[in-house]
Amino acid sequence: MLLQGIFPALTTPFTADGAVYHKKIEHNVDRYSRTPISGMVVLGSTGEAVMLSDEERREVLKISAEVASPEKVMIAGTGAESVIETLRMTDYAAKLKYDVALVRTPHFYRPQMKPEALLTFYRAVADRSPLPVLLYTVPPFTAYDLPLEIIVELSEHRNIIGIKESSGNVEKVGAMVQATRHLKRTAVVTEIQQAATGRMLAAGRAENGQIVALAEIGAANGGTAVAAPPKVPQIKTRSKEVGFQVLVGAAHTLLNSLQIGATGGVLGFAAPAPTICFEIYAAFRDNDQELARSKQDALALATKRVVSEMGIAAVKYAMDLNGYYGGPPRLPLLPLSAAQKKEIEALMANFRN
């Protein structure tokens, strides 16, 4: 699977009483689908996945997959503390035609999470996963940073296609890019070099095999019902060579990371402001480094304050300001104060969609 560009880390909407707000999932995913992002990550850290029951996680995955445009790459957060639970959720995501499984590092038994334990965990998941696996190291939340040597060793597994690196350490990003540069794999892409998603290909097959409704022709004149010819979808694919794909999780390091070989970003700041994040990526891709730098510098303060420091409640309020539904976080995450809301309004004033 081709993992290039910007992937918003979606939040999970809740009602005022803390229930999952299904209609607002539909609203948000539909709106993201209309932006130039490459895809979406459902049930990552920004999605408060650890706050949800198993049934709720399945509901969120199902609704998001049903609403998302077929051309958007859908990445499901399926990681759990055990191999068996990770695989159960990954199997479910595969049935919904997600494209990639995002698997965070197990960390609760941190003293026992030695290199051999992490290697065993990820290899056991990747061996049996019906989806390609994206490693996920997020030390701000897990207090565990997946070591470079383990990442490099795991990158050799055919079903581990990349990593979401959320430490914010640009030097480490560069090191893992260099250490995995020798890996060459192929991904199925469209004629315009965009990812050919599972839902896109499945829709094409379904449309090819669909029996269209009969058209009544000239019934009054003794005519008969005939079947119109099936519509043939215009989906042509080709292969593209890719390596071990590194996505970063800190928006304030996006440009620096792209410049040293990262392929894109899974960004919490893209939840309220996908446009500015995409503009940085597009300017870099078009080799307009000056424009990319000016846009990167413009969002640095906002992303550090809103995402890194104030967290999910702030991300959700920023979404409310930009036409998405953020709503409240789930307790014990606390709502924002009036002063914090005013600060976010000022920080986000230049990033309206």
Image (tube, rainbow, N blue to C red):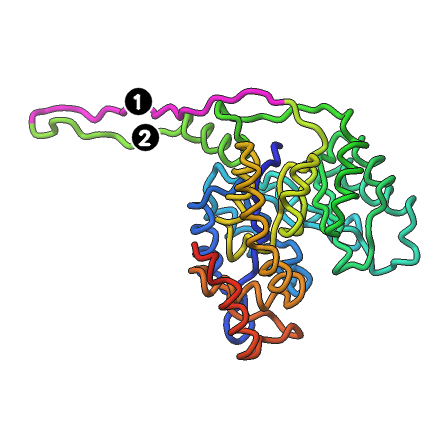
Q: Which residues are magenta?
A: 221-240
> At which x and y percent is residue 178?
78, 32
Residue 198, x across and y down, in percent = 55, 34
Classify the position of the C terminus by image quarter. bottom left
**Numbered circle sitting on residue 254:** none
Where is mark 1, residue-wise? 229
- In the depicted structure, whether residue 232 falls above or below residue 175: above
Identify residue for label 2. Answer: 212
Give the residue type that dot 2 points to.
Val
Q: Are marks 1 and 2 in contact (CB under 8 Å)?
A: yes
Mark 1 nearby-residue class (10 Å; few <14, some 14–19, many ≥20): few
Residue 157 x/y as whole percent? 79, 32
| Amino acid type of the residue tagged 1 in the rendering | Pro
Residue depicted at 66% across the width and 27% down the height: 242
Task: Check disc 1 and report its element: helix, strand or loop.
Answer: loop
Taken as a whole, is the magenta stretch helix, strand or loop?
loop
In the image, residue 281 lies in the stretch drawn in magenta:
no
**Residue plotted at (63% across, 43% down):** 255
